[in-house]
Amino acid sequence: MEIITLANDIGQLVSKGIVIANAEDGADLVGNTYFQGLTKLIISEEQLTPSFFDLSTKLAGEILQKFSNYRIRLAIVGDFEKFKSNSLKDFIFESNKVGQINFVNSTTEAINALNR
């Protein structure tokens, strides 16, 4: 798991493949981010297990709560239009409105969201 520092306390997870397969992986990522002194992190949708996007698994809630507890803002970059779940769409909408967790389409959008 490799995190590079971009700017303004923003890190980006650059590891290939699925990095977060369960809640423990999420806790490890939060710990690594916190240890590096970063307060904002960008990850890619492809780095998350597909079950993250199935809200019935409660995995998203478990992982995202850890980021909130440590006050690490998160931007997840991906194409979220492919998900047909109305509850997931509502979750993404509400998350983006609050701004602690952001679902965006590009790294540029992620940086802009995290700098707000």
Image (tube, helix red, strand yellow):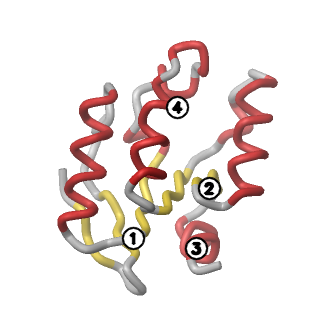
- Kind of residue indicated by mark 2: Asn
Which x, y percent locates residue 92? Answer: 71, 42
Seen in the picture, residue 25 relative to 53 is either above or below; the reply is below
Quarter of the image for the C terminus: give it: bottom right
Q: Residues within 10 Å of mark 1 (few under 14, many from 20)?
A: some
**Of callouts 1 and 3, the N-terminal one:** 1
Distance from Cα at disc 4 to Cα at disc 2 = 14 Å
Which x, y percent locates residue 50? Answer: 47, 24
- Residue 86, quarter of picture: top right
Distance from Cα at disc 1 to Cα at disc 3 = 17 Å
Q: Residues within 10 Å of mark 2 (few under 14, many from 20)?
A: many
* Mark 3 residue element: helix
**Of callouts 1 and 4, the N-terminal one:** 1
Q: Residue under label 4, please give it.
A: 61
- Which residue lies at the image location 42% right of the left edge and 53% below the top edge? 43
Of the two numbered discs 3 and 2 in the rendering, the one whose residue sits closer to the viewer: 2
- Residue 10, quarter of picture: bottom left
- Which residue lies at the image location 58% right of the left edge and 53% below the top edge? 101
Q: Which mark is residue 39?
A: 1
Distance from Cα at disc 3 to Cα at disc 4 = 25 Å
Which x, y percent locates residue 73? Answer: 49, 62
Which x, y percent locates residue 72? Answer: 43, 61
Residue 4 is left or right of residue 65, and the answer is left
Q: Which mark is residue 8?
A: none
* Mark 1 residue element: loop
**How many numbered markers are drawn?**
4
Q: Residue under label 3, please give it.
A: 108
Q: Residue under label 2, please give it.
A: 102
* Mark 4 residue element: helix
Residue 15 is left or right of residue 41, and the answer is left
**Of callouts 3 and 4, the N-terminal one:** 4
